[in-house]
Amino acid sequence: GAVVSQHPSWVICKSGTSVKIECRSLDFQATTMFWYRQFPKQSLMLMATSNEGSKATYEQGVEKDKFLINHASLTLSTLTVTSAHPEDSSFYICSATRGGWNEQFFGPGTRLTVL
Amino acid sequence: GEDVEQSLFLSVREGDSSVINCTYTDSSSTYLYWYKQEPGAGLQLLTYIFSNMDMKQDQRLTVLLNKKDKHLSLRIADTQTGDSAIYFCAEYSNASKIIFGSGTRLSIQP
């Protein structure tokens, strides 16, 4: 149990377009989901924390108008990168908790390349 | 602030033991984790240890925690080629977040 999926697994888009990434908890209800960003050969940086039915909490330095997060149900959170630019190219990983925040289950990641 | 540090690379011979070290700064961390990331994939939780424990063993994995020095280590016995990956040390901070280290890339030599 505790499987988290992401879709798509990779996406290539033109500069200026918007891209939506989905994160789903497949076999449990996720009260909280997290979105991370990982640059090549670097660690995961927390972007935002998302609770079902409420606004996401963004980390310092993350533009909330640039990275729109929606957590409409207990099994789905989406991250939309608006007006994407090449510097937004990265590996985006989501995670979900089913109880305490100390145990997070990670998705396989989505690689975004902006041309 | 919270910080987790690890060495970037480790190379071991197949069959030997691998020891990956980590230091952290938040003395109030309640949980400390080791995650494994294979190329192009998400993170897999390998093991975790409560802050009131000194050691935890799980098959080939042994975690040692020195709370006084804020030092955590992961020992992989009988390292295999399938253990090649990036290993992230992480702490559950008092801000209810998981803070990750930079990751240690483990490579296995035949």
Image (spheres, rainbow, N blue to C red):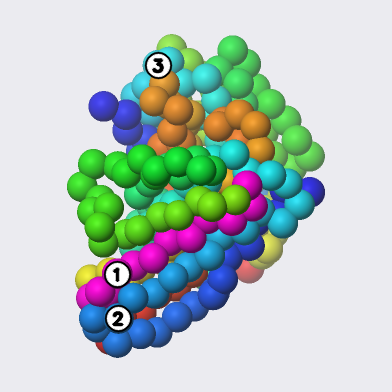
The type of residue carrying mark 1 is Thr
Q: Are tags 1 and 3 found on a single chain?
A: no
* Pointers 1 and 2 within a single chain: yes
* Residue A29 appears anywhere in the view: yes
Q: Secondary structure at mark 1?
A: loop
Q: Residues within 10 Å of mark 3 (few under 14, many from 20)?
A: some
Residue A88, x across and y down, in percent:
28, 69
Q: Which residues are magenta?
A: A74-85
User: Which residue position is annotated with label 2?
Assistant: A17
Q: Secondary structure at mark 3?
A: loop
- Residue drawn at (65%, 22%), measured in percent from left and top? B55
Q: Is residue B69 left or right of residue B46?
A: left
From mark 1 to mark 3, how far is it between C-alphas?
38 Å
Mark 2 residue crowding within 10 angstroms, few (<14) / some (14–19) / many (20+): few
Which of label 1 and label 3 is nearer to you? 1
Q: Which mark is residue A48?
A: none
Residue B6 appears in view: no
Amino acid tagged 3: Ser
* Residue under label 1: A82
In the picture of the structure, the residue carrying the numbered disc 3 is B27
